[in-house]
Image (cartoon, rainbow, N blue to C red):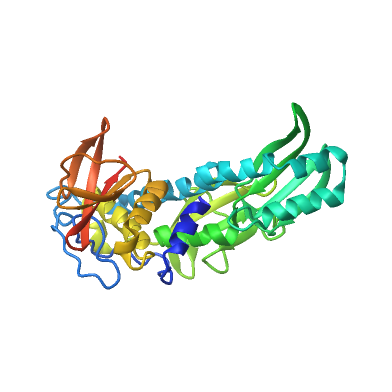
């Protein structure tokens, strides 16, 4: 999902918010975000009543928040390991006649030159590429700490002449993406730094690798740890650990439905804040949110849709359930720059 980072970067990013900065903040705009930077946001106030008169989420609040952010983080990782942009970059490698011919000939200098050209080709997003023939590494070019490796074969005609491992993301880029999308502290553990067992993260020093669901104390704060499996380049193990601070008391007093409401709002707020000015990037926002969430985004002025990857239903409520393409979605919306209203259909 390097495409997500590229889209966000192209929109003149604002500085990243502090880790966990939206957790527990009052989300008041139709169940979505408080406002985009500099906007005069208006909302229907649906978030406040989303869970009434249901009982408080209480002890389940942290797990409710974590479930949504883990969903987003898994989608970001899956995009890095197998999204559309990854498929395009794999095609760049497999279609290189210079590379395949050099591998078939066993010409190491020519293999190195071809790999170097692919990795540093402007407009492509390959951060590391390793080419092998049998057990021999013929070339390995790119950054040192890489995640989400993708494997493939090199062929001349119908004959396989070699193999490759490539990636479109490094540890720093992935941590930045997760932080920009969720604001949740993240630490990466595993090889390729086995002596330390730690790759990179936002909490320093990192705690010992926790098990999924464990309680971890860092700098005197108790965090709920959620651990996700990943891969380190070229074939190492990776644990992606998200650390959730105790939720604010006001958030725990709301229903679990309202907590989900606010948590999705936090994700939307983090993403929308990266696009400046937001009205010039509605289509980028729609694509980025859909890729990271699995939800659907539409921007409308009245009944006219001005952004979105697909045509939406004729009528959309500002909040609440809606049926679209055979599924029921929960609608959150906000109006940071009237008359345009942004609708997010969250996956259930």
- Residue 275 lies, with reference to residue 238, above or below; the image says below
Q: Residue furthest top?
A: 158
User: Where is the C terminus found, in terms of image quarters?
Assistant: top left
Q: Nearer the viewer, residue 2 or 100?
A: 100
Q: Nearer the viewer, residue 188 or 140?
A: 140
In the visual, does 129 lie left or right of 69? right
- Residue 160 lies, with reference to residue 255, above or below; the image says above
Q: Nearer the viewer, residue 64 or 159?
A: 159
Q: Quadrant of residue 163?
A: top right
- Residue 209 makes an appearance in the image: yes
For the point 32% across and 63% down, the residue is: 280
For the point 87% across and 45% down, the residue is: 107
In the visual, does 100 lie left or right of 237? right
In the visual, does 339 lie left or right of 99? left
Q: Nearer the viewer, residue 81 or 85?
A: 85
| Residue 130: percent from left, percent from top | 74, 48
| Residue 52: percent from left, percent from top | 13, 50
- Residue 191 makes an appearance in the image: no
The image shows a total of numbered marks equal to 0
For the point 26% across and 60% down, the residue is: 33
| Residue 21: percent from left, percent from top | 36, 67
| Residue 63: percent from left, percent from top | 36, 49
């Amino acid at each position: 999902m390097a495409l997500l980072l590229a889209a966000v970067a192209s929109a003149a990013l604002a500085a990243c918010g502090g880790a966990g900065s939206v957790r527990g903040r009052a989300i008041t705009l139709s169940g979505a975000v408080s406002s985009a930077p500099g906007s005069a946001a208006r909302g229907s106030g649906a978030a406040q009543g989303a869970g009434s008169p249901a009982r408080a989420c209480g002890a389940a609040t942290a797990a409710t928040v974590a479930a949504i952010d883990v969903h987003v983080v898994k989608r970001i990782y899956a995009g890095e390991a197998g999204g559309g942009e990854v498929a395009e970059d794999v095609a760049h490698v497999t279609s290189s006649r210079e590379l395949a011919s050099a591998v078939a000939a066993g010409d190491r200098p020519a293999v190195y030159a071809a790999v170097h050209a692919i990795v540093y080709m402007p407009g492509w997003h390959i951060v590391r590429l390793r080419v092998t023939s049998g057990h021999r590494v013929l070339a390995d070019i790119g950054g040192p700490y890489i995640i989400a490796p993708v494997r493939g074969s090199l062929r001349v005609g119908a004959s396989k002449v070699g193999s490759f491992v490539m990636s479109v993301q490094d540890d720093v880029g992935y941590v930045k993406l997760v932080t920009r999308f969720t604001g949740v502290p993240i630490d990466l553990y595993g090889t390729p730094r086995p002596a330390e067992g730690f790759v990179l993260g936002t909490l320093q020093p990192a705690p010992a690798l926790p098990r999924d669901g464990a309680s971890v104390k860092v700098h005197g704060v108790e965090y709920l740890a959620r651990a996700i499996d990943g891969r380190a380049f070229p074939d190492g193990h990776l644990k992606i650990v998200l650390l959730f601070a105790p939720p604010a008391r006001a958030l725990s007093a709301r229903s679990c439905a309202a907590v989900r409401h606010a948590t999705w709002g936090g994700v939307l707020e983090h993403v929308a804040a990266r696009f400046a000015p937001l009205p010039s990037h509605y289509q980028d926002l729609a694509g980025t949110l859909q890729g990271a969430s699995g939800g659907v985004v539409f921007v409308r002025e009245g009944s006219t849709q001005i952004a979105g990857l697909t045509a939406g239903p004729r009528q959309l409520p500002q909040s609440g359930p809606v049926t679209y393409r055979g599924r029921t979605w929960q609608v959150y919306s906000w109006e940071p720059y009237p008359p345009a209203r942004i609708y997010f259909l969250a996956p259930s």
